[in-house]
Amino acid sequence: MNPIHRRQFLATTAALAVAPALQARAKFRLNYILSSCMYGTLPLKTIVPEVSKIGASQLDIWPRVHGNQREQVEEMGHEKFAALLKKHNVNLGCITRYDLGPFGLKDEMSVAAKLGARVLVCGGRGQKGLKGAGLKAEVKKFVELMRSHIAAAEKAGVTIAIENHGSNLINTPDSLKWLVELAPSKNIGIALAPYHLEGGGLDSAGLARLIAALGNRISMFYAWQHGLGCMKKLPKEQELLQLPGRGKLDFEPIVGALKKISYTGFTSIFMHPVPRGIPILDDAVACTAEINRARAYLDKYLERS
């Protein structure tokens, strides 16, 4: 064999041999994050060790009324909190601050930058119940009001993720699409909650199409369905229908869409108990086991899609 051809043959053979290994290493996985409010107001020293048990390395901190871990951070001090995270090999990935709203995050951006959080979640602001051109105009107005806040987020190295919360300006597929179109900065994104969209009539296929349209402007995906809702006290087995694999929402097309866009944001297995501020189940062990049940349900679809 000609030496040059031989070298080409050997190089090609080596590449073919390495390709499966590279493909295996690149296998798509959801980037799970643990939302502290799933454990009610249990102490951070109890919650932080649970992060690795759900296949995650990131923590999402919530304040009252859903939890009180953000308040706990201030009580223990930032240095002690950082030390607790380091002890358990956990990173602070997100701080959720619906209470502050999109225009009140300035000081929280500094805290996020100090503690290493990449995402701040809040709701939108503006006139509700609009459609068509009126809705687009109101989203544009919101984006203009957010300009200085987006600039501050860029400086702090964080992303403001707007959730499609019910009774909110940003709560429909059109409003979400216009938000990412009119605010192209990577420092403003979406916290996508199927719960609120499903309640508005969007099915699995519609959610999958929306994910494809939004792409990696989604910074947080809540694996959360409507079930029987979260606004009134229900028997526990009915309340848990909000979680993946328990209610009627088929997550297979949704997981397939996340895989197709090579989704890089966080995924939180999520629900709201009634009343707010209590763990989803009796103790941390039970909460973690339930999150892992939902995670196994989601992960099986990664193998199929």
Image: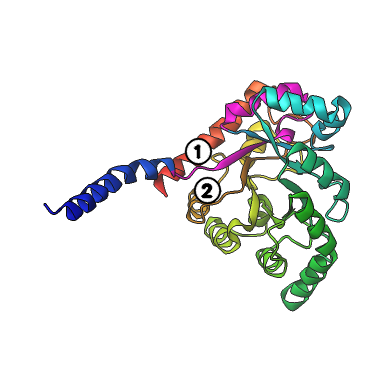
Q: Is residue 33 magenta?
A: yes
**Position of 251 relative to 241 (above/below):** below
Horizontal and vertical percent position of residue 107:
88, 46
**Alpha-carbon span between mark 2 and mark 1:** 9 Å
Left/right of residue 18 with respect to residue 147 in the rendered view: left
Taking depth in this image into account, of 7 and 226 the one nearest to the observer is 7
Amino acid tagged 1:
Tyr
The residue located at (27%, 45%) in the rendering is 14
Mark 1 lies on residue: 297
The secondary element bearing badge 1 is classed as helix
The residue located at (48%, 55%) in the rendering is 260
Horizontal and vertical percent position of residue 253:
49, 53
Taking depth in this image into account, of 116 and 104 the one nearest to the observer is 116
Q: Residues within 10 Å of mark 2 (few under 14, many from 20)?
A: many
Taking depth in this image into account, of 78 and 238 the one nearest to the observer is 78
Mark 2 lies on residue: 251
Q: Which corner quadrant of the image does residue 206 belong to?
A: bottom right
Amino acid tagged 2:
Phe
Farthest front residue?
3
